[in-house]
Amino acid sequence: MFSVIAVITSAVGPAGRTASATPPCNGVQYSISYAAPVWSVVLLRGPVFHLPAWYRYPVSRDWRPLLERIGTAVGRDEPVTLLDRDENATLSTSDVILLWDEGPEQEWLLLMWSPNVTTQGWEQHVLLRDGGSYRCAGGTPMLLDETFLCLAPLAAIVLLPLLLLAKAVARDRKRREQRDP
């Protein structure tokens, strides 16, 4: 039985994730530019999450809803805004996040996808470097977790009777060998 579990674990990986040399692409892909005093983060690919997007407000460090910043003017008083290029009211490909930074002093733009601000969601840290970009070379998003959770009970239903049958056959064989030396 241990060998079956070891085979399943090695094939699927820890916690149901596939073992892979490249990370999956969950967050946004982007390119960055700085034209004093504003950072521009252009989304090359939007997020795969269908959850509200939040950003960490640079001044007070609290999380705020990014979609509430659509079309607002970026400035010292409101340092983050979202240009919703496709006007679909979601964070998606070709949208631009603007961050006011006179220094430039900001090193990171922190994004989070979560149903609400009190629930820890999936975070992405955007390193602010002029000319920088992030293009994921990984595979599909980590959706195997749900697939594994659905298929694991089915596999258990199929494998458990087989394991019990193999154990019963081995026990019967051992009994026969002890009776008929």
Image (cartoon, rainbow, N blue to C red):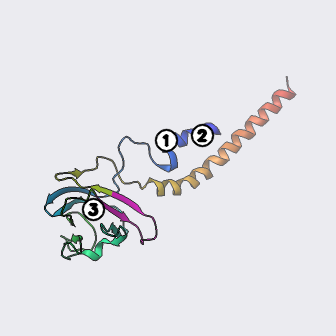
Q: Earlier in the sequence, mark 1 or mark 3?
A: 1
Q: Earlier in the sequence, mark 3 or mark 2?
A: 2
Disc 3/disc 2 C-alpha distance (Å): 39 Å
**Badge 1, how many Cα within 10 Å: few under 14, some, many 20+?**
few
Instruction: Give the percent coordinates (x, y) of residue 25.
Output: 33, 53
**Label 3: which secondary element:** loop
Q: Residue at x 85, y 25 (%)?
A: 180
Q: Residue at x 21, y 61 (%)?
A: 41
**Label 2: which secondary element:** helix
Q: Quadrant of residue 83?
A: bottom left
Between 112 and 15, the residue placed more toward the observer is: 112
Drawn side of residue 166 relative to residue 92, left or right: right
Q: Which residue is mark 3?
A: 46
Q: Which residue is mark 2?
A: 4
Drawn side of residue 96 relative to residue 137, left or right: left
Q: Earlier in the sequence, mark 1 or mark 2?
A: 2
Residue type at numbered disc 2: Val
- The vertical placement of 134 against 58, above or below, is above
- The vertical placement of 44 against 165, above or below, is below
Single out the residue that lies furthest toward the left: 35
**Label 1: which secondary element:** helix
- Which mark lies nearer to you, 3 or 2? 3
> Which stretch appears magenta?
108-124
**Badge 3, how many Cα within 10 Å: few under 14, some, many 20+?**
some
Between 54 and 173, the residue placed more toward the observer is: 54
Q: Image quadrant for the C terminus?
A: top right
Instruction: Give the percent coordinates (x, y) of residue 72.
Output: 20, 77
Residue type at numbered disc 1: Ala
Q: Residue at x 32, y 47 (%)?
A: 138
Residue 11's tag is: 1
- Which mark lies nearer to you, 1 or 3? 3
